[in-house]
C-alpha cells in the first residue's frame, strides 16, 4: 500500500518571521498540535491547517499499515520512500493518507482520523499526474 505523507514546512520567510517574533500560522498550528496531549483537538487543528494550505506533499511511503508507515518514515528503509520535497522524520502533526483517501494525523499517541479525502491519496495523485502528461 502507498501512503502519501504531508508535512508543514517552514520557508526562509517563515523562519525570518518566527525569529523576528512575528506570528506565523505554520508555527502556531505545529505548536497547538504538539501540545494537544489528549488528542481531542489535533484533528481539527490539522484539518484547518490543511484547508489553509499549510501542508506540503513531501513523499509517498510503501508500507502495510499506518504504524509501519510511521516506522519507515523514521528509520527506513529509504528504498520504501519516494521523496518529492524536503522531508523530516514523521512526528506529531504530520498527515498520512492511505490509498482509499482516509486521512490521519500523527498524534502524541498513535493516529487520529481527520476524514476522507480521496483527492489526497496516492492513487488519485498518480492518476492526475498521468492525466497531465
Image (cartoon, rainbow, N blue to C red):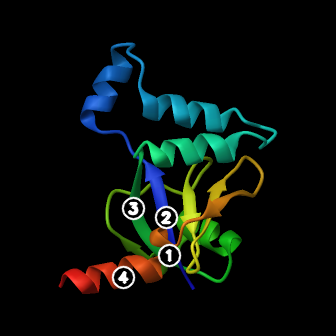
Tag 2 secondary structure: strand
Distance from label 1 to label 4 (Cα)? Answer: 14 Å
Above-or-below relation of 132 to 43: below
Tag 1 secondary structure: strand
Q: Badges 2 and 4: C-beta atoms under 8 Å apart?
A: no
Count of labels shown? 4
Q: Badges 3 and 1: C-beta atoms under 8 Å apart?
A: no
Circle 3 Cα neighbour tier, 10 Å, few/some/many (<14 / 14–19 / ≥20): some
Circle nearer the viewer, 2 or 4? 4
Work out whether mark 2 precedes mark 4 in sequence or the reverse, and give the earlier one: 2
Distance from label 1 to label 2 (Cα)? Answer: 7 Å
Distance from label 4 to label 3 (Cα)? Answer: 14 Å
Q: Which residue is mark 3?
A: 58
Work out whether mark 4 precedes mark 3 in sequence or the reverse, and give the earlier one: 3
Q: Badges 2 and 3: C-beta atoms under 8 Å apart?
A: yes
Q: Which residue is mark 4?
A: 126
Circle 2 Cα neighbour tier, 10 Å, few/some/many (<14 / 14–19 / ≥20): many
In the image, is 56 to the left or to the right of 116?
left
Q: Which residue is mark 2?
A: 5
Amino acid at each position: 500500500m502507498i501512503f502519501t505523507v504531508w508535512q508543514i514546512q517552514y520557508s526562509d520567510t517563515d523562519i525570518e518571521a518566527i525569529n523576528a517574533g512575528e506570528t506565523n500560522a505554520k508555527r502556531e498550528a505545529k505548536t497547538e498540535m504538539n501540545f494537544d496531549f489528549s488528542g481531542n483537538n489535533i484533528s481539527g487543528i490539522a484539518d484547518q491547517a490543511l484547508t489553509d494550505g499549510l501542508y506540503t506533499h513531501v513523499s509517498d511511503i510503501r508500507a502495510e499499515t499506518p504504524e509501519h508507515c510511521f516506522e519507515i518514515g523514521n528509520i527506513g528503509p529509504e528504498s520504501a520512500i519516494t521523496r518529492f520535497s524536503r522531508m523530516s522524520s514523521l512526528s506529531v502533526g504530520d498527515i498520512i493518507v492511505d490509498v482509499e483517501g482516509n486521512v490521519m494525523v500523527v498524534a502524541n499517541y498513535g493516529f487520529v482520523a481527520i476524514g476522507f479525502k480521496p483527492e489526497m491519496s496516492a492513487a488519485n495523485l498518480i492518476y492526475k499526474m498521468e492525466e497531465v502528461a
